[in-house]
Amino acid sequence: MKKIIYASIIGALSIVSCKTVKNEDQNKAKKAVEVSKKTSQNSTVIDSSLVRKHLYTLASDDMKGRKPGTEGMEKATKYIESEYKRIGLKHFKGLDSYRQTFTHNGIEMSNIIGVLEGTTKKDEYVIISAHHDHLGEKKDGEGDRIFNGANDDASGVTGVLALADYYAKKGTNERSILFVCFTAEEMGLVGSKYFGKDIDPSKFVAGINLELIGKEPKTGPKTAWLTGFDRSDFGKIIQKNLEGTGYKLFPDPYTKFNLFFRSDNASLARLGVPSHTFSTTPIDIDADYHKVSDEAETLDVGILTETVKAVAKGTESIINGKDTPTRVVIEE
């Protein structure tokens, strides 16, 4: 009898021991997965080589200045679509492709929209945008006749594509992100106005517009400026998130130019969305603005890359649903 009892005790202890080891193994495996996820997220970077590729492709002579309705613009559109597809972005509601197509002044044109769905707040949208059009080509004259539009606004589109790649790999966005390349900004914010006609503004939490972000601003290295800084607390949220990074965001230093209303952010801001434009270019002394000399070689890929990184870090709490900027009120 004693032998039987002893054997029973040994067996029971063996079972407990096995369960303990199994539980420990499961906990170790769980921790390993968590560490792996954190490592993967921390290793997600804005790659300067990818930034360079986007910039030099979009601002190349092959794009012929990206004027709406031209072959060059179609090439630019296809390039952006191919990147959206590679990244894995979804189509916006009601669309069967990345194109939101419409006709303006007899010209068929398209906004290019990709969606990265959020998790707990998927019905709340943050829009990251830039305009992919420019001025096309000079009709006559000698020498260079292509308005490549590298800084204006291939730099911004490069930022949109780099951020789409970054957020898709990171996979931590609680809110849904719309990546939009607006058309015909140079013709009077045509694309963004069209987009604004068919949305529910109350579902749009913030607008992050990128324009002219490839040169060092007058505020110095590792800085950018934001249009309409005092119209919401969007800029203050960004400043707080950038604390300790060595990068700083300043209010728009060019108040006399009324820049808040001169880029695509304005179309959403007029609907109440806290939508603002990031820029770095010293536009008061920029010799290349709307000139054929606005080519990729005149930009600093390092500055462009650092700016995109700052946008990612600065908007992180908004993307993740922790902060919600105050709404914009426009008094006409």
Image (cartoon, helix red, strand yellow):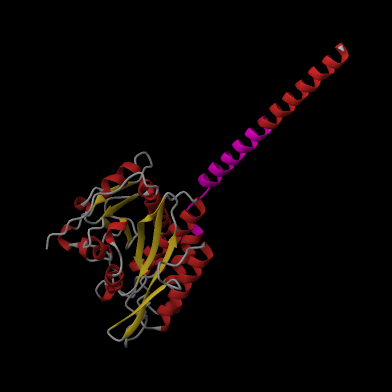
**Residue 71 place in picture, x, y as percent:** 42, 83
Residue 198 included in the magenta stretch of the image: no
Going 37% across and 63% down the picture, which residue do you hit?
156
Horizontal side of 84 relative to 291 (left or right) equals right
The answer to which of 272 and 3 lies nearer the viewer is: 3
The answer to which of 236 and 287 lies nearer the viewer is: 236
**Residue 158 place in picture, x, y as percent:** 42, 63
Going 43% across and 74% down the picture, which residue do you hit?
77
Residue 264 showing in the rendered view? yes
- The picture quadrant where one finds residue 133 is bottom left
**Residue 41 place in picture, x, y as percent:** 51, 46
Residue lying at the far front in this picture: please name it: 1
Residue 48 included in the magenta stretch of the image: yes
Q: What secondary structure characterizes most of the magenta part?
A: helix
- The picture quadrant where one finds residue 62 is bottom left
Horizontal side of 277 relative to 319 (left or right) equals left
Going 87% across and 12% down the picture, which residue do you hit?
1
Q: Is residue 81 above or below residue 212?
A: below
First to last magenta residue range:
24-49
Q: Is residue 254 above or below residue 316?
A: below
